[in-house]
Structures are given as structure tokens and as C-alpha cells.
Amino acid sequence: MLKQSKKLAVALLLSASATGAFAAGTLSGTDISSTASFSFTVNGTTSTLTDTNSYKVDNKIDLVVSTVDTQAVTVGADTTNVLLTYTVRNDGNTVQDFLLTSLETSTIAFSGANEVSDTYGLDNVRVFVDANNNGVYDVTTDTESYIDELAPDAEATVFIIADVPADAANDAIAVYDLQAQAAQGEGIGSEGTAISSDNGNVADDAATVQIVFADGAGTTDVQYDGMFSSADAWKIVTANLTVSKNSIVISDPVNGITNPKRIPGAEVRYCYIVTNATGSADATGAIITDTLNPVTLEAAGSAVAMFNGSGTCDCNSVEADITGLNGPTGQDPNAAGLTLFDFETIGGGVTECAYVTVTIK
């Protein structure tokens, strides 16, 4: 029995052994051992009691997938290996594999002024990890479709790669999600097995490394499912060209300019209208080659005129009313019977026109 005059000295000393502390926390599997010491004196005799508690740090699975692009990536029609760029960060406390999947699930990507809505799907969609982390898809280098042995606090760059069909419409939007799922690593160079559930419904076992999902909700997944996802998008930017050729009779030798007819000696004007009205991309190398039969038609090179970017093309105007000449003249229509109009570049939203006047022989 302890007497009141006697002092009781109690010291509780905790010592811990833990290594591998990261921003993501202590590595899973680490043994944490702490010993409590209880010292006391009775009748002048000091005694010490100790007890040790040990347990293993559990596996906290946490990851974040982020879209690197800040707005829809513009691509042209009939192009291959266009890419969207993402990062996958391991916010857990275990070296982990991550399985990667491309999903055409989200209807919207980005927000505010950059928000776009999905209207189109691309061809040959694939996922590859940026092996040398240079931000460029290297066909012979970036060949893995999963992230291998990603350390805590580390991140990897991932591409979704696709091909754009030739008939893709201008302003079409293709939204794709990258989904990453934690996997049990099988060693360097081996794709891990998906971790589909954690130990949330299992009692704590101090001697076992248990799994705890700590991830948030992404664009296609929910909180605490061992996955994360993020959306990105392509925007198709292409020229949408139309061309039309019309003709009117300006005069003939019998009626003059009053109700003229297409008889020998009549002057006929051909009008060529090229429109990129609904296109977003410039059309380059735009030329028109027309065969005007020199046996039945005769034309002077001086009668060939181009009106680049005039926006108003009226074949029904009399020749004196055709104004706004600002382009080069075409080749002489009598040269091998060809009239060549070189529009060079036709910008998006632009209409250009060219005219040639011929005489029926």
C-alpha cells in the first residue's frame, strides 16, 4: 500500500521507429513500434514496468488525374495520332501500378468560356504513358498503356491518342476522359492487377497491411473507389469549301445587250464562286482549272479577273459593274484551252470569286 508521504513518480516514455515519411505519409508496411515505461517507487524501492505496441502502416490509396490542356485541342480532319495530355499523381503511401482507360463518357469538358460539349467520336483511340516525360508522343518509345511502379508523391504524364476521320465536320467536339485505377504491382515491367475494393468493411488488423481508398470523385468515378478521372477534348478545325460555276450571256450580235442569246458571236461570262463560309481553318493552294474549248470559245486574257475576298460575287452584273478587282488575273484562257485561277489562301468565313468572258465562235 502506498502511503501519502511517499512520492509516486510516473513517467510515460514513448519511442517510435518509423522511416519513409513523405508528403503522402509514411510508407505502407512500415512497422511502427512504441514502448511505454512506467516507473514508480514503493517503500524506497523503484520499479519499472514496460509494454510495447507494434503495428504496420496500412495502404492509403489516393490518386489524382489532371488535364494538362487548358482548352479544347484544335486538330484538322484526316489527321493521325492527335493527342490529349494528362497527369496521374500518386497521393497514396505505396508504390503503385495504375491501369489506364480512355472513356467517351463526359458530355462536357472545361468550364466558363472554354466549356465545350461532346458531339463526335474519333477513331483508333489509345492510351500511352509518356515514357521519357518529354511531353511529346514518341511512337517507338511511348508504348506502355499502364503506369508501372509509381512512387508516392510522383506523377506520370499520359496521352490519349486518336485519329481524326477525313469527313470530320468543322467545329465538331470530341470529349474523352482518362480514368486511372490503382493496381497491385507485380514488379517492374509487369502490369498489376486492379484493386477493386478496400478493407473498409473488415476489422482492423495491426499485423496486416490493409487497404483504404482515400481518393476523391473524378469526372466518371465516385469518391473512395480507387479510381480517378478527368476530361479533355479535341475541337475539329477544318475548311468547309463549296464551289459553283455559273454563266450569263452579256450580249449577242443581233440583240445587243437586250435579251441577248447564246449564239455565235455572243459574249458569255463565266463566274466562279468559292466559299469557306462555315470553315474555321484556311484552305491553302486553292486553284480552279477549267477547260474552255478553244474550238467553240474565244477569250482574251485581259478579260480574266479575280476578286479575292470580295465577299460579293454577282454573275448577273454587267461587266462594267464588276468592281473590287484585287486579285491577279488568271492565265490566258486560249492557252491550251485552260483557265487557271490561283486563289492561294481562302480564309475561314471568306467568299472569293473570279470571272472570265468568252465569245462563242
Image (cartoon, helix red, strand yellow):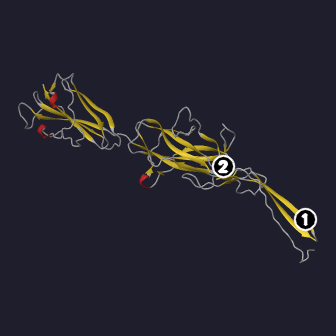
The disc label shown at residue 204, or none: none
Left or right: where 278 falls relative to 198: left
Label 1 sits on residue: 47
Left or right: where 223 falls relative to 314: right
Residue 323 seen in this snapshot: yes
| SS of the residue under disc 2 | loop
Amino acid type, callout 1: Ser
Residues at circles 2 and 1 in contact by the CB criterion of under 8 Å: no
Left or right: where 286 falls relative to 267: right
The image quadrant of residue 249 is top left
Residue 271 seen in this snapshot: no
Please tell me which residue is depicted at 53% across the width and 34% down the height of the picture.
Answer: 138
Q: Residues within 10 Å of mark 2 (few under 14, many from 20)?
A: few
Left or right: where 123 falls relative to 169: right
Percent position of residue 265, x then y: 10, 28
Amino acid type, callout 2: Ser
How many discs mark residues in the rendered view? Answer: 2
Q: CA distance from mark 2 to mark 1?
A: 52 Å
Percent position of residue 48, x then y: 88, 63
Nearest the viewer among 105 and 71 is 71
Label 2 sits on residue: 196
Q: Quadrant of the C terminus?
A: top left
The image quadrant of residue 257 is top left
Q: In the picture shown, does residue 282 fall above or below 197?
A: above
Q: Quadrant of the N terminus?
A: bottom right
First-in-chain label (2 vs 1) = 1
Q: In the picture shown, does residue 238 fall above or below 106?
A: above
Q: Nearer the viewer, mark 2 or mark 1?
A: 1
